[in-house]
Image (spheres, helix red, strand yellow):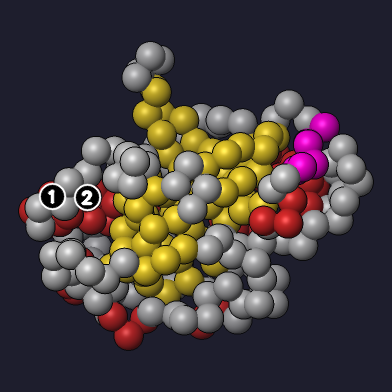
C-alpha cells in the first residue's frame, strides 16, 4: 500500500523543462508535442469528455480542449500544502491511503471498486480564510452515479463535479509541484492572450496517469485549466 503513495509522490522534472524557469516566461510551444500518449488510461476507467475543435483560436498541439459532463469523484478532505506543494507531507499521505481504501472495500456497501485514472490533485484558494487548500481524488465510475457508496471516514467524501470546459496541457514524464504551478500559470496566460473568455479556472489541477503495472516510459500527466461557467 505504501508503494502506491511512493509511486504517486515520486515526481521529477519534465524532460522539456528549463531549470527554475520564470513562471511568466515559460513557452508552452517548447514542450514536445510528440510526448502525447493516446492510451493514457491503460485499460482503466477514465472520465469521459468531448474534444472541442470548432470556433477556437489556434493553440499549440500539446493543448487539448475538452467538454466534460457531470461526474462524481471520491475526494480527500482538504489538507494544507507543504512548502506550497500538494504532493508531499504526512497529512497528504495519510489521506491518500484512506482514498485507496475506499476502492478496496472500505465503504458503506463493502464494494471492491476497480481503481480509476487519473489521480487528480487540486490546489484551491479559499478567499474567506485567505489560505490555499489541497485535495486528492479519484474518478467514480458512472455505474455508481445513481447511488454511490459512502466512505465511513469523515476525511473522505463523494463529491459532484459540474459540467465544464477544460484546457489540458499534456506531457509524458514526471514533474514537481513548482513546475506544475508554473505550467498552470503559463497556460492560463496563454489562453488570455488568445482571447479565450475564462470566467473561472484559477484552481491548479494535476491529472496524473500512473500506478502499478504502468512502465516508467508510459507515465503521463496533464495540467488543466477548467472553466465551469463556460457551458452554462
Instruction: Please state which of residues 125 and 193 is positioned toward the viewer in this rendering.
Output: 193
Is the C terminus in the top left, top right, bottom left or bottom right quadrant?
Answer: top left
Left or right of 42, for residue 191: left
Q: Can residue 184 be seen in the rendering of this structure?
A: yes
Q: Residue at x 31, y 67 (%)?
A: 52
Q: Residues within 10 Å of mark 2 (few under 14, many from 20)?
A: some
Residue 147 picture quarter: top right
Name the spot of residue 111 as percent of width and height, x first.
87, 51
Q: Residues within 10 Å of mark 1 (few under 14, many from 20)?
A: few
Q: Does the CB distance between marks 1 and 2 fall below 8 Å?
A: yes
User: Is residue 22 placed above or below 45 in the rendered structure?
Assistant: above
Q: Can residue 189 be seen in the rendering of this structure?
A: no
Residue 213 picture quarter: bottom right
Is the N terminus in the top left, top right, bottom left or bottom right quadrant?
Answer: bottom right
Q: Residue at x 37, y 69 (%)?
A: 51
Name the spot of residue 22 as percent of width and height, x first.
16, 52
Residue position for label 2: 188
The Cα atoms of the two marked residues, 1 and 2, are separated by: 6 Å
Instruction: Please state which of residues 218 and 202 is positioned toward the viewer in this rendering.
Output: 202
Element marked by disc 2: helix
Name the spot of residue 141 as percent of width and height, x first.
68, 57
Span highlighted in magenta in the image: 147-152
Residue position for label 1: 192
Q: Magenta residues: mostly which secondary structure? A: loop
Left or right of 40, for residue 42: right
Furthest-top residue in view? 128
- Which mark identifies residue 125? none
Q: Tell me if residue 149 is in the magenta stretch.
A: yes
User: Is residue 64 placed above or below 143 in the rendered structure?
Assistant: below
Instruction: Please state which of residues 131 and 50 is positioned toward the viewer in this rendering.
Output: 50
Q: Residue at x 61, y 46 (%)?
A: 72
Amino acid at each position: 500500500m505504501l508503494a502506491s503513495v511512493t509511486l504517486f509522490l515520486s515526481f521529477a522534472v519534465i524532460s522539456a523543462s528549463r531549470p527554475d524557469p520564470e513562471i511568466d516566461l515559460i513557452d508552452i510551444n517548447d514542450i514536445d508535442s510528440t510526448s502525447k500518449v493516446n492510451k493514457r488510461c491503460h485499460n482503466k476507467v477514465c472520465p469521459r469528455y468531448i474534444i472541442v475543435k470548432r470556433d477556437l483560436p489556434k493553440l499549440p498541439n500539446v493543448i487539448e480542449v475538452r467538454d466534460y459532463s457531470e461526474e462524481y469523484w471520491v475526494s480527500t478532505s482538504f489538507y494544507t500544502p507543504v512548502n506550497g506543494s500538494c504532493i508531499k507531507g504526512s497529512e497528504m499521505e495519510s489521506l491518500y491511503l484512506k482514498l485507496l481504501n475506499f476502492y478496496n472495500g472500505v465503504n458503506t456497501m463493502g464494494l471492491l471498486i476497480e481503481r480509476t485514472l487519473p489521480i487528480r490533485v487540486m490546489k484551491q484558494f479559499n478567499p474567506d480564510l485567505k489560505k490555499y487548500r489541497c485535495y486528492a481524488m479519484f474518478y467514480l465510475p458512472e455505474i455508481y452515479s445513481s447511488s454511490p457508496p459512502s466512505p465511513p471516514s469523515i476525511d473522505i467524501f463523494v463529491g459532484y463535479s459540474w459540467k465544464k470546459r477544460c484546457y489540458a496541457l499534456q506531457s509524458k514524464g514526471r514533474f514537481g509541484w513548482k513546475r506544475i504551478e508554473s505550467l498552470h500559470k503559463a497556460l492560463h496566460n496563454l489562453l488570455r492572450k488568445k482571447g479565450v473568455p475564462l470566467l473561472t479556472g484559477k484552481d491548479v489541477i494535476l491529472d496524473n496517469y500512473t500506478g502499478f503495472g504502468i512502465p516508467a516510459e508510459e507515465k503521463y500527466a496533464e495540467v488543466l485549466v477548467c472553466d465551469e461557467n463556460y457551458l452554462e
